[in-house]
Image (cartoon, rainbow, N blue to C red):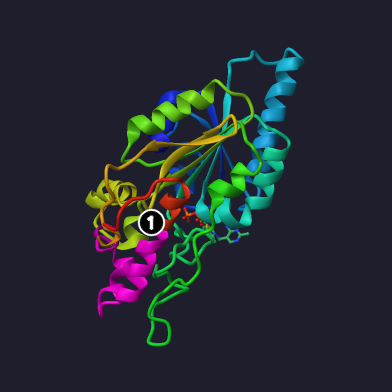
Amino acid sequence: MIRLMLKVLGPKTFIVNAAGCMTLLQTYPYSNLKSGWLYTAFASAPAGAQGIRDALDSLISQGKARDEGVNVLVLTGDGGAYDIGLQATSAAMDRDLDFYYLCYDNEAYANTGYQLSGATPYGSWTTTTPASERNPVGATRKKKDLFEIWKAHEPAYLATVSPSHPLDLMKKVEEAEARSGPKMFIGFASCPTGMGFDPSQSLEVARMAVETGVWPLKKYLDGKVIHTYLPNRLRPIEDYLRLQKRYAHLFEPLNREAISFMQSQVLLYWKRQGIAYPLP
Ligand SMILES: Cc1ncc(C[n+]2csc(CCOP(=O)(O)OP(=O)(O)O)c2C)c(N)n1
């Protein structure tokens, strides 16, 4: 997703990163990116982005730097976006900061061993929600709806993306480019280590998240939410769950009740969008 995004935005993109797996893309003084990079404290990436944007604008207005159209991009995991950095993100959106934000959502605090985050869905194993006799489900809370939380701020652009749908992703970034203000992206991030599958299945897992309706592809602009990809019919949620070890406890022994609940939640989401998919 980062590669696709940077293909559109170009190397003149300054990345501001909070602690997480992607921090390891840069090990000072080495870099595998052409972009600039600022590593901030966990909760403050959007505040760091404000600093970079202001510094650039100030240098340009003083004639000390040429305006080369440098973009500022915040890159954080879901722990950073949904939880610890939510306040800083809200404030940056409130100030109408002109920046991009990619939350790569692997649905847990992955870098520290896959602990429960606000993005962890019901039924997922994490190291802090292990399935047990007392709690055979794993995580028992609903995933926070970050799209709706961000949407309430009315950012210039907001979209969900998936690496399994690269053209959808790139088109959205292109569309966002034409706008000034907060340009917010939430991307499904397959995590082989935490979710539990072979890395070669990463795209398959991401695609299945979309085809089961678990990960809707949508955008919000000019006051409207538009779904950018509608599966003809939904694949059963089991097809998605069975690919990942984090859901293995739901099948051994079979927990029909939990799986049916998860399926009903997916259908409910789409029903609320005005799309009545039949039970797959
Ligand atoms: C204030 C603070 N608390 C805890 C940590 C330890 N820490 C480093 S990365 C990380 C997990 C980040 O999770 P997420 O934002 O979901 O990104 P991911 O690890 O999934 O890439 C944590 C807890 C930290 N760096 N700073």
- Which kind of residue does numbered mark 1 sit on? Leu
Magenta: predominant secondary structure element? helix
Q: Residue furthest right?
A: 62
Q: Residue furthest bottom?
A: 133
Is the residue indicated by label 1 positioned so its CB lies within 8 Å of ligand 1? Answer: no
Q: Position of residue 261 (x, y in %)?
A: 38, 68
Other-residue count near label 1 (Cα within 10 Å), few / some / many at <14 / 14–19 / ≥20: many
Left or right of 132? Residue 36 is: right
Q: Name the secondary structure under disc 1.
A: helix
Instruction: Give the magenta part as a residue range.
Output: 239-265
For the question of whether residue 155 can be seen, the reply is yes
Residue toward you, 269 or 68: 269
Left or right of 153? Residue 36 is: left
What residue is shown at x 72% (from left), y 29% (from top)? 54
What residue is shown at x 29% (from left), y 52% (from top)? 205
State whether residue 247 is above or below residue 174.
Answer: below
For the question of whether residue 34 can be seen, the reply is no
Ligand 1 quadrant in view:
bottom right
Residue toward you, 227 or 106: 227
Tally of numbered tags: 1
What residue is shown at x 25% (from left), y 48% (from top)? 204
Residue 194 on the magenta segment: no
State whether residue 133 is above or below residue 121.
Answer: below
Q: Position of residue 133 (x, y in %)?
A: 38, 87
Q: Position of residue 106 (x, y in %)?
A: 42, 54
**Which of the image's four quarters has the N terminus?**
top left
Q: Position of residue 152 (x, y in %)?
A: 64, 44
Label 1, on which residue? 267
Residue toward you, 257 or 252: 257
State whether residue 173 is above or below residue 18.
Answer: above
Residue 240 on the magenta segment: yes
